[in-house]
Image (cartoon, helix red, strand yellow):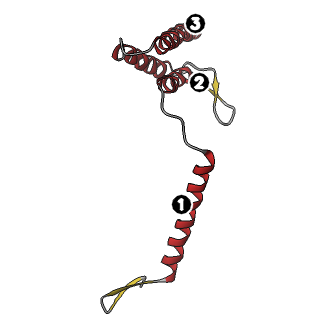
Amino acid sequence: MADEQQGGKIHVDSDWKAEAQREKERLAELEQEMEQRGPLPEPSFAEVLDMIAMQAAIGLGGYQGPGGQRIPPDLAAAKHYIDMVELIEKKTAGNLTEQEKGMLDRVLYELRMRYVQAAGASAARTT
């Protein structure tokens, strides 16, 4: 057995020790990679907004997947993410810098316009 009690002590076989050593080495390699990459920047409002806007843009179509295949539009998902940006606009009203407010306004306007275009194109295809 791997773990056997011998006189009140636990006996651990060499396979377990070797696996523990390999795991320790993998963790050390991961830490070294993280040190080489350097610290990540501080989170920012722009980063959060970009992350949500990118999901909306993907839902609007026109992007390619990792294999090069076209990602079809998903207008319901796009609308959901646009609604999330609108929620951010409402919840942050009066708490943003002028630069952040301008960025939010531009992103929301652009996403809304692209949604209207995509919805129009989708309707034209189905008629």
Q: Which mark is residue 72?
A: 2
Would you name the residue on which mark 3 appears? 124
Identify the residue at image location x=60%, y=56%. Answer: 32
Q: Position of residue 49 (x, y in %)?
A: 48, 22
Q: Amino acid at mark 3?
A: Ala
Mark 1 or 2, nearer chain start: 1
Q: Amino acid at mark 2?
A: Pro
Count neighbours of disc 3 (C-alpha within 10 A) and say few if under 14, some if 14 to 19, many if 20 or more: few
Identify the residue at image location x=67%, y=31%. Answer: 69
Q: Are marks 3 and 1 in contact (CB under 8 Å)?
A: no
Q: Nearer the viewer, mark 2 or mark 3?
A: 2
Along the viewing direction, whichever of 113 and 119 lies nearer the viewer = 113
* Quarter in which the N terminus is drawn: bottom left
Q: Nearer the viewer, mark 1 or mark 2?
A: 1
Element class at badge 2: loop
Would you name the residue on which mark 1 appears? 27
Mark 2 or 3, nearer chain start: 2
Count neighbours of disc 2 (C-alpha within 10 A) and say few if under 14, some if 14 to 19, many if 20 or more: some
Q: Position of residue 105 (x, y in %)?
A: 48, 9
Identify the residue at image location x=48%, y=24%. Answer: 52
Residue farthest toward the left in the current orientation of the protein: 8
Q: Please state if 77 lies on the left or on the right of 95 as rendered.
A: right
Residue 41: which quarter of the image? top right
Above or below — where is 34 with respect to 22? above
Q: Please state if 38 lies on the left or on the right of 105 as rendered.
A: right
Mark 3 or 1, nearer chain start: 1
Residue farthest toward the bottom in the current orientation of the protein: 7
